[in-house]
Image (cartoon, rainbow, N blue to C red):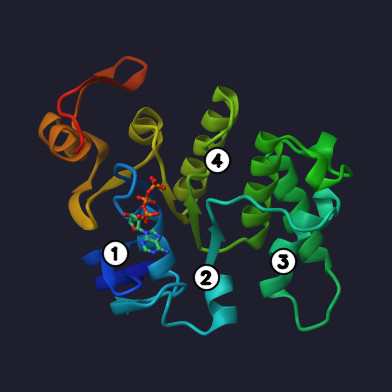
Amino acid sequence: MTRLTLDKLTVLRGACPVIDAVTLAVGPGECVGLIGPNGAGKTTLMRGALGLLPHRGHSSLAALPERARAQACAWMPQTREIAWPVSVETLIALGRIPHLPRGARLRDTDRRAVDAAIAHMGLDGLRTRTATQLSGGEQARVLIARALAQDTPLLMADEPIAGLDPAGQIATMQIFAGLARGGRSVIASLHDLGLAARHCTRLVLLGAGRLVADGPPAEVLTQANLRQVFGVSAFFEQTAQGPVFQPLDILREDG
Ligand SMILES: Nc1ncnc2c1ncn2[C@@H]1O[C@H](COP(=O)(O)OP(=O)(O)OP(=O)(O)O)[C@@H](O)[C@H]1O
């Protein structure tokens, strides 16, 4: 039973196909890093898969009715807008809406999910603070907690660790990897290929709207792929402390 199946998904921005016939399936236990240079189509692929952009081909998520889709997948968009000055706790509790009967108040199970998400993201000390008054990185952690509270089989996140400090980035990737080890599925677009290599079970590499490579990090982060898609060379080795990846030099100028 897959958590997301895309079959020749083509996603349009205006009349222009920005994602071109991408086919992939994500199953339980996978922590997938969606990687590729700026403009490769990572956001477009995820939004198309969610049914938020016009598309051709098939996405199993886009095919679901709205409420079932929100129960199947928590989505963390790249823009981290918090619209109202509510408390951190209230904002995280919004993640429970897809599970609540219409108009119902939070039940014990919902409160437990909110508490677990707060504990997971180390937000106990910020629980009663006004969310709009937090720092950017703190807001990012709160929005991840809201997605965790949604308690879905699949979590899809657009650059979730951008703007977090090193400890916050590592902690978030460890949480994602832990969710996957527990049988959930995670798809996250990432620019930090080092963290992607260390924490993801699988990398999907996009270049100019096409799927260029898909597999375990060591099979995707090859010198040939890095040169072709990112135009860089890199150091990448399995060490006693796990995989270590560092981009080194630019190999070509982008036009
Ligand atoms: N509303 C839009 N109308 C037309 N083209 C768009 C629109 N939004 C994005 N694009 C184009 O689609 C392409 C893919 O954009 P997308 O945001 O999916 O890339 P990305 O891989 O997520 O990039 P980044 O790493 O910079 O966030 C880009 O060339 C972009 O200019």
Name the residue type under label 1.
Answer: Ala
Marks 4 and 2, Cα distance to the nearest angstrom? 19 Å
> Which SS class for mark 1?
strand
Left or right: residue 100 versus residue 73 is: right
Q: Nearer the viewer, residue 205 or 117?
A: 205
Q: Nearer the viewer, residue 119 or 63?
A: 63
N-terminal label among 2 and 1: 1
Is residue 159 visible in the rendered image? The answer is: yes
N-terminal label among 4 and 1: 1
Label 1: which residue? 25
Label 4: which residue? 175
User: In the picture shown, does residue 50 fall above or below 197?
Assistant: below
Q: In x, y percent, where is residue 210?
A: 20, 57
Label 3: which residue? 96
N-terminal label among 3 and 2: 2
Q: Residues within 10 Å of mark 1 (few under 14, many from 20)?
A: few
Marks 3 and 2, Cα distance to the nearest angstrom? 12 Å
Q: Residue at x 10, y 34 (%)?
A: 224
Marks 4 and 1, Cα distance to the nearest angstrom? 22 Å
> Which SS class for mark 4?
helix
Residue 95, picture quadrant: bottom right
Is residue 22 visible in the rendered image? The answer is: no
Name the residue type under label 3.
Answer: Arg
N-terminal label among 4 and 3: 3
Q: In x, y percent, where is residue 199?
A: 40, 35
Q: In x, y percent, where is residue 180?
A: 45, 49
Q: Pick the quarter of the image with the C terminus.
A: top left
> Which SS class for mark 3?
helix
Q: Residue at x 70, y 37 (%)?
A: 138
Name the residue type under label 2.
Answer: Ala
